[in-house]
Image: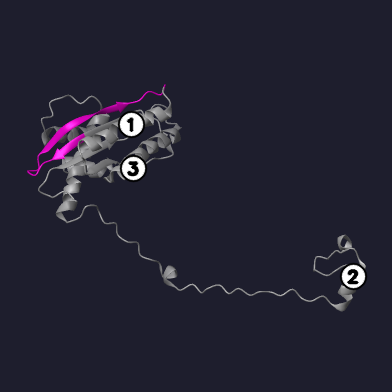
């Protein structure tokens, strides 16, 4: 377990199949934030989906091991089945985009599981709060806050996905430090209260064996005197003569 006095390394991911932003940051013991690497994994639709997912997996898995990160942060995604377009105001089905983005999220969970990493999904408002100080900050305010927070950020960020990944990484390491200050390695989820119906004891089922009634003397005579294939029963179960 990492001590609070140690540096905390985290990786932030702005997940997607076509464009996947990533960033590895370090939160030092003096609360300085250092960026070690960042960029965008761009995959072409000309390649097989399996190849694109493999590239994302290999890159993020390698970075997680190289920097020995203790937390992997990503965006918690919310989708609406239809999104109105600003140009034609018609509903646009985004089911394909949802499926692909969820695939990328699944890759992150696989990496976290294989490397015993703490994975945390953050809603945009939480990222804005940790980086810019309030949950209603604009993208411009978040970008300016990132420049102020990160030491040695001299390069120009290439994509919006890279910028978002840096903000998510900052959120992740700060969130991790808060947990560690509370003596926790990971957040404790509150237990769900059982409903009154669930608390009631359910009686065990009673099984009763029903014995086949013995045939009457009249029925026995019919069975003896008729071939088996000619014996028929009515809907009430009575043998037809």
Residue 168 position, x and y percent, is: 23, 39
Q: Residues within 10 Å of mark 3 (few under 14, many from 20)?
A: some
Please give the range of residues in magenta: 24-46
Q: From this viewpoint, is residue 86 visible?
A: no
Q: How far apart are the two marked residues, 1 and 2, measured between alpha carbons?
A: 77 Å
Residue 106's disc number: none
Badge 2 local density, few (<14 within 10 Å), some, or many (20+)? few
| Quadrant (top left, top right, bottom left, bottom right) of the C terminus | bottom right
Give the x, y percent position of residue 10: 20, 40
Label placed on residue 109: 3
Residue 224 disc label: 2
Tell which circle, 1 or 3, labels the residue nearer the N-terminal end: 1
CA–CA distance in space, label 1 to label 3: 13 Å
User: Horizontally, is 108 left or right of 83 in the view?
Assistant: left
SS majority, magenta: strand
The residue that label 1 is drawn on is 56
Occupied quadrant, residue 27: top left
Point out the frontmost of discs 1 and 2. Answer: 2
Q: Nearer the viewer, residue 147 or 92?
A: 147
Q: Is residue 45 magenta?
A: yes
Of mark 1 and mark 2, the one earlier in the sequence is 1
Residue 60 x/y as whole percent: 28, 34
Which tag is nearer the camera, tag 3 or tag 2? 2
């Amino acid at each position: 377990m990492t001590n609070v006095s140690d540096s905390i390394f985290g990786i932030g991911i702005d997940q997607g199949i076509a464009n996947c932003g990533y960033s590895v940051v370090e939160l030092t013991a003096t609360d300085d934030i250092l960026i070690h690497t960042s960029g965008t994994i761009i995959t072409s639709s000309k390649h097989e989906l399996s190849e694109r997912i493999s590239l994302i997996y290999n890159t993020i898995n390698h970075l997680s091991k190289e920097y020995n990160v203790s937390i992997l942060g990503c965006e918690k995604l919310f989708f609406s089945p239809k999104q109105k377009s600003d140009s034609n105001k018609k509903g646009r089905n985004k089911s394909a985009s949802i499926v692909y983005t969820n695939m990328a999220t699944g890759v992150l969970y696989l990496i976290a599981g294989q490397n015993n990493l703490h994975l945390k999904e953050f809603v945009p408002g939480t990222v804005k709060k940790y980086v810019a100080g309030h949950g209603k900050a604009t993208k411009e305010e978040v970008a300016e806050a990132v420049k102020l927070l990160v030491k040695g950020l001299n390069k120009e960020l290439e994509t919006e996905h890279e910028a978002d990944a840096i903000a998510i990484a900052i959120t992740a390491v700060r969130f991790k430090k808060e947990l560690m200050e509370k003596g926790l390695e990971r957040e404790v989820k509150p237990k769900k209260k059982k409903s009154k119906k669930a608390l009631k004891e359910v009686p065990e089922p009673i099984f009763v064996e029903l014995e086949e009634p013995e045939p009457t003397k009249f029925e026995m005579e019919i069975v003896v005197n008729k071939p088996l294939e000619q014996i028929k029963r009515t809907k009430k179960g009575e043998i037809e003569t």
